[in-house]
Image (cartoon, grey):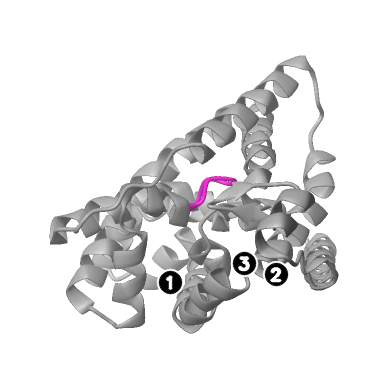
Amino acid sequence: MGAADIVPGVSGGTLALLLGIYERLIKAIRSVDHHAIGMVLQGKLNAAWQHMDGTFLLCLFSGILLSVFLLANGVSWMLAHQPVLLWALFFGLILSALPHLCFKLNWNRSRLALLMVGVGIALAIGRLQPVELEPELWMYFVAGAIAICAMILPGISGSFILLLLGMYAPVLLAVTELHLVPLALFASGCAVGLLSFSRLLSCLLARYHDATLALLIGVVIGAMYRVWPWQLAGEPVSFATYAQQNGSLQLGWAVLLAVVGILLMQGMLRLERQQDSRDDVSN
């Protein structure tokens, strides 16, 4: 999820949804509430930890943060010098898991309509044009609050939202050069946005589970064009157009990276199924 969140056009929420941990993630984040704070103040630390699904959140966010700090430079280099291969990897990851996700739902006309609405939302957001600005410090807080909502929404890239806000380069610079004040403000905005938005998502999933998932799957499908490997100026193009502009499609390497992405996703899905089987046996 951390690697996905670095790349504009790819969402960590997409990976969470495809891997089957999305609902647990939203529920766990929502559980960081006044009940948990009350337990901590009363010294009931173990109860608070269980209430928040603390081990799950610790493992997840530790992995995300570690990935962001370790991969930020490498991903930036790949985006600048080998974008086709980077996009091919994520294209394979996402495409591989979509059938698995779709088969989990019982489809009807209303859910298909919501899926199409989700596709339209993703396409509309993807057509927006980024802005450039010189950020003030307070903008890091606002950018964090907005971008984190996109990061936990499948199909909508938090990094792409940062690009639209003109904050992607400043935030990435703060990460790579450890500018602590901007990073602290950005993290604070993320915390506020995450705790607020997770409550809305949790409510929707509780009351309208399949309808909400159908909409989210539509957003993921609509966002697939943002990860098409052959792009010019941020827009997907045909093989012929790309070859005319760049001379080489890197088709062999792109297919190889897409296959690597497919194998990685299938391996993770297999681990998920094995874990679910062990949980069923233990229960």
> What residue is disc 3 on?
83
Q: Secondary structure at mark 2?
A: helix
Q: Are marks 3 and 2 in contact (CB under 8 Å)?
A: yes
Residue 152 or 204: which is nearer the viewer?
152
* Residue type, numbered disc 2: Leu
Decide whether the magenta segment is chiefly helix, strand or loop. Answer: loop
Residue at the (45%, 38%) spot, across then down: 128
Front tag of 1 and 3: 3
* Front of the two marks 2 and 1: 2
**Is residue 252 left or right of 26 when viewed as pictured?**
right
- Image vertical order of residue 230 relative to residue 256, above or below: above
Residue 209 vertical position relative to residue 174 in the rendered view, above or below:
above
Under mark 3, the amino acid is Pro
Which label belongs to residue 46? Answer: 1
Distance CA(mark 1)–CA(mark 3) = 46 Å
> Which residue is farthest top?
109
Tell me the distance, in whole angstroms, between the alpha carbons under discs 2 and 1: 45 Å
- Residue at 58% in and 55% down: 10
Pointer 2: what residue?
Answer: 85
Disc 3/disc 2 C-alpha distance (Å): 5 Å
Residues at badges 1 and 3 in contact (C-beta under 8 Å)?
Answer: no
